[in-house]
Structures are given as structure tokens and as C-alpha cells.
Amino acid sequence: SKTIIENAAVSARQLKRIVEDLLDTAAIEEGRFGYVFEEMNIVDFIGKVLAEIAPLARKSGIKVYFDKPKSSLPRVVADPLKLSIAINNLLENAVRYNVENGEVIVKVDQEDKPYIKISVSDTGIGIARQEIGKLFTKFFRSLNVTESQIEGSGLGLYITKNIIRAHGGEIWAESEPGRGSVFSFTLTTNPNLIPKHEASVE
């Protein structure tokens, strides 16, 4: 009936996502992920990505807030398609591994020049200290995530880390079990700080 069809649709979406993650991982490791960098307004860009995550957040009963910078920021150099994958991964995790009526706050700020810092904080289930170091490795899934039975490839954060590093940035996480997590990353405003990459193969 309706429930069976809905469950099948969810399973199909999850399977499609896992296959996409595996394909992206293979492309990254074979050096053919193909980046196309351009200058962009990061505040406008994140606004668009947040609009895309809004339906999932609403369905999950999670409030998402955008803490915009007080003054205008220099433009960052990024691949919009790849960066949206990275930010989406962080936002989806922040929504999925949150508590009932939880919150997600996205903050953008000027870091030490020439970097912009973006952080995604949540009021979720958190990550044990001994697991933080393994977060960005392939196929890693936190113990409290597997206990809550949320399907995933275990590749999202690995892909995200590779995308941020390819942009000349760094990514890290801070967390307290039961109190939530903060994932932060930097993007450069100086094109010379982006590693020389393979040309786009798109």
C-alpha cells in the first residue's frame, strides 16, 4: 500500500545516494573529479544551498538559521557544483543526526586573511572524542549513528574533506556527545592558494 511505496521510494533514494558517493570517491581517488573554479559571493551561494535543504529540515522538524556576517566579505574562489556537494553533506548530517525540534546554525565569517570560515553547528547527538579523528576517513560511521539506524555510505565526510582540500581549505570538527557538533571549514579568497588541479573533465 502507500507505506510500502513510500518506504521503497526512500530506499531507492538512499541507494542512489550511496552509488553516487561511491562514484564520486572513485573519481576523487583517480584524480578525475574535475574542478572548475570561479569567483563567487559565498553568502549568496550558501543562501541558495540552504533553500535546497529547507524541505528536509521542515520534514525533520529542525530549524535552520543563517548567521550572516555583519560586513561584506571578499569573494571566494570555488567550484559551485563541488562546493554545494560538500556543504550539502554537512547540512544533511546536521539535520539527520539532530534531536527532535533541534537547530542548525550556519555561520560565515572572515578568517585570517585570505580565508573565509564557514561553520555548521547542530544540537544533535554529537560524536565521541575518540571518534573525531576518524570522522573524515572512508566508510567511517559513528557508533551512535549506527545505533540510530540511519542509512548512509560512510563516504559523505570523506568526499567533503577532499573537496575542501582541493579548494585550498581545511576542515575540522568539534563535538560533545549529547550536546551537538560544529563542523568548520575554510575557503580562500586568493586563487594562487588553490592547489593546481586536473582540468575539468565534466
Image (tube, helix red, strand yellow):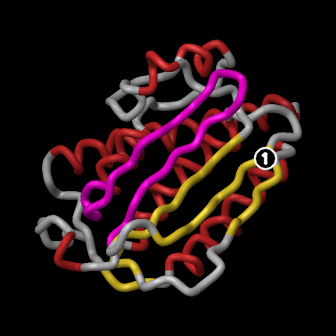
The quadrant of the rendering that contains the N terminus is top right
Where residue 174 sits: x, y (%)?
A: 52, 36
Closer to the camera in the image, 191 or 91: 191
Q: Is residue 72 left or right of residue 19?
A: right
| Mark 1, other Cα within 10 Å: few <14 / some 14–19 / many ≥20 | many
Q: How many marks?
A: 1
Where residue 200 sits: x, y (%)?
A: 20, 72
Residue 74 versus residue 89 in the image, above or below: below
Kind of residue at disc 1:
Glu
Q: Quadrant of residue 11 in the image?
A: top right
Range of residues picked out in magenta: 165-188
Q: What is the secondary structure assignment of the residue under circle 1?
A: strand
Closer to the camera in the image, 44 or 23: 44
Residue 6 versus residue 42 in the image, above or below: above
The residue beneath circle 1 is: 103
Q: Is residue 57 left or right of residue 153?
A: right
What residue appears at the point 55 percent right and 14 percent down from the top-left corner?
143
Q: Overall secondary structure of the magenta stretch?
A: strand
The quadrant of the rendering that contains the C terminus is bottom left
What residue appears at the point 58 percent right and 43 percent down from the top-left corner?
182
Where residue 16 sits: x, y (%)?
A: 50, 43
Residue 171 versus residue 64 in the image, above or below: above
Closer to the camera in the image, 3 or 132: 132
The magenta stretch spans residue 87: no
Q: Is residue 117 left or right of residue 31?
A: right
What residue appears at the point 74 percent right and 51 percent down from the top-left corner?
56
Q: Quadrant of residue 6 in the image?
A: top right
Where residue 24 sits: x, y (%)?
A: 32, 48
What residue appears at the point 33 percent right and 83 percent down from the top-left corner?
38
